[in-house]
Image (spheres, helix red, strand yellow):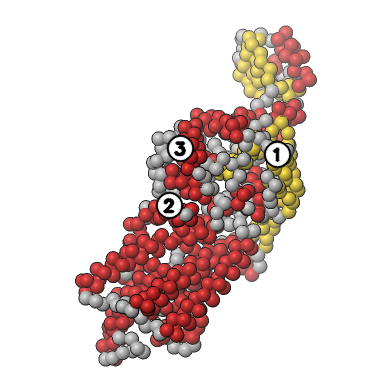
């Protein structure tokens, strides 16, 4: 059953446009020109209970705006949204008790006090009973390995520790729906990995529905079976991550290691040369011909090793954005 | 009970800024000294009372004005427009199943309580060192009414300042409005001279505007300078302004929140 239903969602911002220079400034004193910036332009999708969906797109694509509309922060210009049976913008208490939005760049922790004080505030706000509060804080701080720091003043914590504490504050009320906006931004690779593990576990343990936006394809690849790709406010792909590769990959990549130096001229004709040095080359070859070309290379050149692979997901996504522009 | 616990948690937060609030209060204490020096000259020249004020009551007036201003005048507007609306901190409040109004109320009232505490200490010290120069009414009934007027004054000031903050939903540069408001308050709240000394029609305008009910009348009530009729009139006006501001608050919130972008406005 769908927990999130979005139908023809539009969100336009009115933006002031000023001509450059002093003349433009003087003109704008008398008459200001505005135009509608289309942050989200007619998108529709549904998300089922327990799904973990990756929302990806370049900067300004409309990812965060969509999340803000879904969590009731923004008033949509048009279209309808239904989350858990509620219109998010009504911000009914019963609705807010079941969702959480974590934004990597915004925080709710009190800067001058230990994180546990913010947890206590959320305990009261969400009316969490003492037993459940204690159990959840113990469990989450254990899982995220911050047991020792929740009593330390927030301003003294590292970025990673702070983000983990933010997550605890956002999850204390065990939300059924979790919106994660760039949750791993600014974290080192080890911390990113840990956080991904945690998100996955939360999704499985609580059957929570999670929408995640990220610039790191690693987040999406590791966590999401389904992705929604958005660009200039419109959805350009909605489906499984595996299908993207099938749908958008026209070439396979052949990585060849040579026994002895080979000139670049010898490789022309096999495909598009992506990288070359005399002992190693990467060649893009149409999928249908990849086996045939690999056989030809093996027969005609001094090959030590050959590897046939799909392009990485990041390359595919970049290709999708470039071709859609 | 839940509201009380949230109230206490916010108090812990504000206590972290106790030194900063004490410095703010000390700085504000310098203002009455300038006015008192001016009035000393004026009273010496006139050799008597001026419009019902003597050197002693005017000294009390300016010290109490500072005290009332520190403990009753809310400064929540900057929080609302700069941090919440323009920098997008409002996001965190909107996501909570709890009223934004009350969370802001709890975050602000502790500053006033803390400043009120400093006020009492400093006024006691001044009276001990310099003799009884700051005089408040000894009449228990008048004191009770003064407390009622003070509570209403704070509520009027708090909601008014929240409304001022909401202007940021529609405009990015609030500094002009903010400075203009400061000038209006200085004149109409009795900061420069007691309002009954102002010339007509400024005096009548001051009685009609809400600012005198936030500062000036609470000071007069503390000094015991209000008659029973005046007390009822002041409370009546405060209640009317409270109702007007609550209506305006709800209207602007409903309209403004639709304009909120959650990032820079």
What residue occupies the far bottom of the structure in this picture? Answer: B47
Q: Is residue B189 above or below residue A206?
A: below
The picture places residue A94, in percent across and down from the top left corner, at 62, 49
Please give left or right for residue A239 compared with residue B148 in the image: right
- Rounded to the nearest whole Å, what is the CA distance between mark 3 and mark 1? 31 Å
- Identified at 60% across, 37% down, the residue is A215
The secondary element bearing badge 1 is classed as: strand
Which circle marks residue A262 in the picture?
A: none
Point out the image quarter for the C terminus of chain A: top right
First-in-chain label (3 vs 1): 1
Q: Chain of mark 3?
A: A
Q: Position of residue B195 (x, y in %)?
A: 42, 83
| Towards the viewer: A30 or B163 | B163
Secondary structure category for the residue under label 3 = helix
* Nearer the camera: disc 1 or disc 2: 2
Name the mark nearer the viewer: 2 or 3: 2
Q: Secondary structure at mark 2?
A: helix
Q: What number is the disc on residue A47?
A: 1
Chain of the residue on which disc 1 is drawn: A
Question: Could you tell me residue A67's position as x and y percent?
Answer: 64, 45
Q: Is residue B193 visible?
A: no
Residue indicated by mark 3: A161
Residue B53 picture quarter: bottom left
Residue wearing tag 2: B9
Report in which chain the residue with disc 2 lies. B
Quote the CA–CA distance across marks 1 and 2: 38 Å
Count neighbours of disc 2 (C-alpha within 10 A) and say few if under 14, some if 14 to 19, many if 20 or more: some
Q: Residue at x 55, y 43 (%)?
A: A173
Q: CA distance from mark 2 to mark 3?
A: 22 Å
């Amino acid at each position: 059953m769908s927990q999130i239903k979005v139908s023809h969602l539009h969100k336009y911002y009115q933006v002031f446009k000023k001509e450059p220079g002093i003349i433009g400034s003087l003109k704008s004193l008398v008459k200001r020109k505005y135009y509608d910036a289309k942050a989200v332009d007619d998108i529709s999708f549904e998300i089922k209970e327990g799904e973990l969906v990756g929302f990806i797109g370049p900067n300004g694509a409309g990812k965060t705006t969509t999340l803000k509309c879904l969590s009731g922060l923004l008033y949509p210009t048009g279209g309808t949204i239904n989350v858990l049976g509620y219109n998010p913008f009504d911000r009914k208490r019963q609705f807010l008790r079941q969702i959480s939005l974590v934004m990597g760049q915004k925080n709710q922790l009190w800067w001058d006090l230990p994180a546990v004080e913010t947890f206590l505030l959320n305990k009261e706000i969400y009316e969490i009973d003492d037993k459940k509060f204690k159990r959840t804080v113990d469990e989450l701080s254990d899982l995220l390995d911050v047991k020792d720091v929740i009593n330390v003043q927030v301003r003294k914590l590292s970025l990673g520790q702070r983000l983990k504490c933010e997550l605890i504050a956002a999850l204390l009320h065990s939300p059924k729906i979790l919106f994660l906006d760039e949750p791993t931004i600014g974290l080192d690779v080890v911390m990113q990995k840990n956080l991904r593990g945690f998100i996955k576990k939360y999704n499985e343990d609580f059957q929570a529905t999670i929408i995640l936006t990220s610039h790191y394809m690693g987040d999406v690849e590791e966590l999401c079976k389904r992705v929604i790709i958005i660009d200039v406010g419109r959805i350009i792909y909605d489906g499984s991550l595996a299908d993207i590769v099938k749908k958008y990959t026209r070439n396979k990549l052949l990585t060849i290691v040579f026994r002895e130096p080979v000139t670049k001229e010898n490789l022309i004709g096999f495909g598009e040369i992506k990288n070359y040095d005399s002992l190693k080359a990467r060649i893009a070859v149409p999928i249908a011909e990849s086996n045939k070309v690999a056989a030809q290379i093996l027969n005609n050149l001094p090959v030590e090793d050959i590897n046939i692979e799909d392009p990485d997901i990041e390359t595919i996504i970049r290709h999708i954005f470039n071709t859609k522009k | 009970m839940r509201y009380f616990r949230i109230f206490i948690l916010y108090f812990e937060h504000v206590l972290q800024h106790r030194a900063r609030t004490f410095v703010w209060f000390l700085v504000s204490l310098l203002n009455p000294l300038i006015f008192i020096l001016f009035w000393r000259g004026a009273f010496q020249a006139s050799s008597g009372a001026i419009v019902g004020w003597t050197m002693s009551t005017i000294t009390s007036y300016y010290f109490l004005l500072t005290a009332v201003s520190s403990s009753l005048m809310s400064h929540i507007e900057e929080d609302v427009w700069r941090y919440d609306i323009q920098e997008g901190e409002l996001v965190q409040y909107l996501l909570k199943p709890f009223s934004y109004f009350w969370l802001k109320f709890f975050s602000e009232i502790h500053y006033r309580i803390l400043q009120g505490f400093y006020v009492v200490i400093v006024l006691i010290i001044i009276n001990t060192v310099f003799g009884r120069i700051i005089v408040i009414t000894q009449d228990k009934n008048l004191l009770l009414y003064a407390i009622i007027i003070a509570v209403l004054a704070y509520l009027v000031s708090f909601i008014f300042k929240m409304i001022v903050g909401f202007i940021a939903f529609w405009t990015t540069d609030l500094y002009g409005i903010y400075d203009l408001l400061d000038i209006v308050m200085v004149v109409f709240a009795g900061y420069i001279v007691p309002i009954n000394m102002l010339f007509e029609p400024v005096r009548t305008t001051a009685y009609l505007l809400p600012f005198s009910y936030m500062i000036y009348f609470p000071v007069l009530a503390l000094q015991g300078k209000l008659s029973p009729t005046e007390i009822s009139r002041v409370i009546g006006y405060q209640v009317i302004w409270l109702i007007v501001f609550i209506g305006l608050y709800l209207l602007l919130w409903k309209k403004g929140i639709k304009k909120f972008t959650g990032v820079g406005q």
